[in-house]
Image (tube, grey):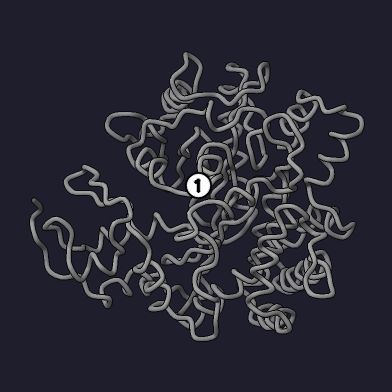
Amino acid sequence: MFKLKERLEKSDIIKLYTKGFTKPEDFKIGIEYERLPININTFKNVDYWSDYGIKNLLETFAKEETWDYITDNKNIIGLKHKHDTLTLEPGCQIEISAKPERTIFELKNKIENINALLSPITERRNIALLNYGVSPYTTYNAINLIPKKRYRIMAKYLWGILSDVMMRETAGIQCCIDFKSEEDAVRKFKLANKLSPFMTAMFANSPIRGGVDTGYKSFRALSWLNTDNDRCGFCGKISDEFSFEEYINCIMKTPMIFIQREGLPFEINGNITFEEFIQNGWEGANATIDDYELHANLYFPEVRMRNFIEIRNHDCVGGDLKYAILAIYKGIMYDNQAIEECEELFKPLQYKDFSELRFNVPKNALQSKVKKAKASDYAKEIISIAENSLKKAQTGEELFLESIKEYTYKNLCPADIILKNWNGSWNKKLNKLINYLSEFS
């Protein structure tokens, strides 16, 4: 059925990661920033095909700003301009993926410029791009998938009672960091995993879904807990023995969803793992490096290793809060003393403590228990370590921490403010929530 190719070796796969080695003086930081397109009159999610829907929005933006189309089977699924992209997630969530920069100031300037170009177009269509983690009103059964073949296959395959919520309703922020060697990558990868539940708690911002208080401060994080545990959660046990090879082994033991040949998808539907694919092939096809890269991109751990490290576990937040996420990681991950201080902070905790915290954070956020302490106690220390590091670097980027300090130092997360208003002056009115989220850009 397929043209056979040479057997894929693990040494070929490892090169995908080692090619990311970067000199410390060239370290950059990147962001992927998703938002929810909401009609400000109906509070419903904006669909792809309607007269003033997302397809029309992208076409208009491309024409007015001379960005190029990204297509799938001739359907527009995003735009690109040089190294920046504006792409769509499965339920029409709009993502800005900016070329990594040396400073957060440069990233902020780039995102604000793109938003300034988007704003007149969204305003003419009565669309608000909400800085929020989950659809506030429309639920997944009323949100159509965009016309991207991969998403239709994923939606059919991914198991878990909230997998459809994750795909169609949620919006998050991802941070990307560099590494100089395998040792450096593994150290940062393990630390990022340990930081991840605390960061989820600090930036929890999705308590209202379907027009009601869900009882969770991050319903987005809850949806990930209930999506395909074969490929979500922590990768491995974040142990001292971790390596590129161990990460690759985790991916190789994961069931495959599909492969592509000549641009067409061929569904495997979990019938074999990638390890079995390498050993035995599938319907005459041999595994290729492209197959591995596709399979690795269909693996969704809290922290993902690529030729950089992608940290994936934050609700979408507005204002400078989104840059506070970057500031914490930059302050810690690009300073050896800060890394050591965080490692020391977490030394009393075992894998099971981080795992239990990950399951408690969606409901309780900073009030989650960590042994005899609370997540908020650790969060304050994390911010302090990052702040001291950024001050030492003398870039001025510590100012981006002020926005999160206003919450964390009061033992609060963004969801706590929303819930206080929702049950108070807003009188559980959706328009009040939408207005609040629309203004908090």
Residue 163: horizontal and vertical position, in percent?
51, 45
Residue 34: horizontal and vertical position, in percent?
57, 42
Three-letter residue code for mark 1? Ser
Which residue is more in the foreground, 340 or 336? 340
Going 47% across and 57% down the picture, which residue do you hit?
A: 300
Q: Is residue 197 above or below residue 226?
A: below
- Residue 37: quarter of image: top right
Q: How many marks?
A: 1
Query: Quick check: 416 left or right of 237?
Result: right
Query: Quick check: 42 left or right of 240?
Result: right
Residue 319: horizontal and vertical position, in percent?
73, 43
Q: Regarding mark 1 in the picture, which secondary structure is present there?
A: strand
Of the 4 image quadrants, the one containing the C terminus is top right
Query: Quick check: 39 left or right of 400?
Result: left
Going 36% across and 68% down the picture, which residue do you hit?
A: 253
Going 50% across and 66% down the picture, which residue do you hit?
A: 309
- Residue 376: quarter of image: bottom right
Q: Is residue 302 above or below residue 244?
A: above
Q: Is residue 35 above or below residue 377?
A: above
Q: Which residue is mark 1?
A: 97
Q: Is residue 109 above or below residue 255?
A: above
Residue 325: horizontal and vertical position, in percent?
67, 57
